[in-house]
Image (spheres, rainbow, N blue to C red):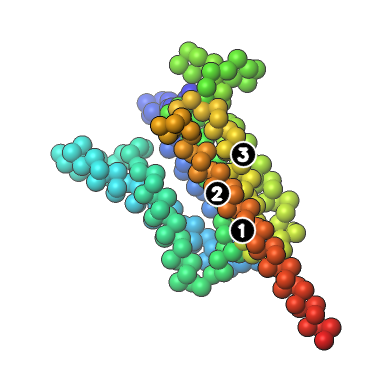
Amino acid sequence: MLPTINIGPLVLPTAGLVYILGIWIALSVVEKAAATLRLHVAATYTVSVTALAAGFIAARVVFVATHWSAYAENLLGIIWPLTSGFNFSAGLLAGVAGGFFYARARQLPAGATLDALAPGILVGLAVVSLADFLAGPGYGKEADLLWSVDLFGIQRHPVQVYEMLVAGLALLGWHLYRSRREYQGQLFLLATAIYSAGRFFVDTFRANAWLTDGGYHVLQIVLLLIFMGCLMLLGHLARQQASAQTEAGTASEG
């Protein structure tokens, strides 16, 4: 759609600019959420930074290692430019691990910390979708709609825009429910459930989805499992909360 921006002699990749701005916004959102939920702001913020740093480094290192022949004669290319060439799976795993171990080291409450991280994660997912929309690696199925976008000379569903709307809906759910949070982790599970359900629907319109041999969307299978897991945990934790309140009421009456 718009892979680069020309500013005089400079040619800047839009995806890189979006990521830089998006990281700043996501971290700011986490900082504000931590303050709203009355958590240790600096520690919660550092969880995000640690996760991002660990994920970024791991994603680059694994990509370079798996494509070493392309870098053996150009070692500078390992660190510059960093506009492409990342292993998403490695970055995701390392980011989760980095944030988890830092949070454990600081003895931060798991559920409450996830509640504060949820808005930042959603902003990050929206940023990825926006970068994808501008750079054009992902595209939707053919569609003759008022909001269709032209890509490769074909009118298509703007799936990345749909994904951003889903992230916005999940953020709205987090915001509306935060004052009614009954237990730690509830906001994270609620936002994750909304986002996974929305993305499950949206992935139907993606033309370059990863499919199984039977033609099923792999991402939809994963999203369905995440959605069901969130619902089960929400129900389980709600029952635990109700049981604890009942026991506390019985003890006070006694």
The numbered mark, 2 or 3, whose residue comes first in the sequence reads: 3
Residue at 30% over, 43% down: 63
**Circle 3: residue type:** Gly
Instruction: State the mark number for residue 198.
Output: 3
Rendering coords of residue 10 (x, y %): 38, 29
| Visible residue check, residue 22 | no
Looking at the rendered structure, the secondary structure element under dot 2 is: helix
**Neighbour tally class for label 3: few under 14, some 14-19, many 20 plus, Cα within 10 Å:** many
Q: In the displayed image of the protein, which residue is found farthest to the left? A: 73
Q: Nearer the viewer, mark 3 or mark 1?
A: 1
Quarter of the image with the C terminus is bottom right
Residue 252 location, quadrant: bottom right
Q: In the displayed image of the protein, which residue is found farthest to the right? A: 253
Rendering coords of residue 27 (x, y %): 53, 53
Query: Relative to 251, does residue 170 appear above or below in the rendering?
Result: above
User: What is the spatial separation of the Cα atoms under label 2 and label 1, in whole angstroms?
Assistant: 10 Å
Q: Which residue is mark 1?
A: 233
User: What is the spatial separation of the Cα atoms under label 2 and label 3, in whole angstroms?
Assistant: 12 Å
Pick the front one: 38 or 244: 244
Q: Which residue is mark 2?
A: 226
Query: Relative to 120, does residue 163 appear above or below in the rendering?
Result: above
Looking at the rendered structure, the secondary structure element under dot 1 is: helix
Query: Relative to 49, does residue 62 appear above or below in the rendering?
Result: above
**Circle 1: residue type:** Leu
Residue at 59% over, 64% down: 111
